[in-house]
Image (spheres, grey):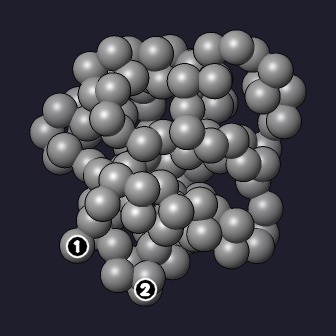
Amino acid sequence: MPKILIVDDEKNVRKLYSEELQREGYETVSASTVSEAIDAVDRESPDLMILDMKLGDESGIDALIEIVEKRKDLPVVINSAYSVFRDNFQTWAADAYLVKSVDLGPLKQKIRELLEQQG
């Protein structure tokens, strides 16, 4: 069962994504800060990460840069309410960039695609 790390500062978003993805057959772990995300990558060895760009006063870009350096093989889906980060070249290290929506269909589809690519 693939393990997905959900990194978002909003507790309700983490809970919703976790419940939805568990229904799809995934194991989930979550983090709300950059340091929690980095620790979770080391401790949990997720197969994919969903990353928000605004983590309270912190930036998801900081987490992305550090995590990609540690785990180049880890697929990362940026899932942000702000499309402006798409223009930041540092976000290009992610495998996908989706704007948050009430419809989780596109997010679930992208997760399936990336995990299939990994084999």
Residue 92 lies, with reference to residue 117, above or below; the image says above
Q: Residue at x 26, y 49 (%)?
A: 46
Q: Residue at x 34, y 15 (%)?
A: 69
Q: Position of residue 34 (x, y in %)?
A: 42, 25
The numbered mark at residue 82 is none
Residue 94 lies, with reference to residue 49, above or below; the image says above
- Say what secondary structure mark 2 lies in: helix
Q: Which residue is mark 1?
A: 1
Residue in front for this viewpoint, 76 or 33: 76
The numbered mark at residue 23 is 2
Residue 92 lies, with reference to residue 37, above or below; the image says above
Residue in front for this viewpoint, 45 or 7: 45
Which of the two marks, 1 or 2, is nearer to us in this view? 1
The Cα atoms of the two marked residues, 1 and 2, are separated by 12 Å
Instruction: Tell me which amino acid carries mark 2.
Output: Arg
Q: Position of residue 4 (x, y in %)?
A: 36, 57
Q: Residue at x 70, y 14 (%)?
A: 89
Instruction: Tell me which amino acid carries mark 1.
Output: Met
Lower sequence index among marks 1 and 2: 1
Q: Residue at x 49, y 68 (%)?
A: 112
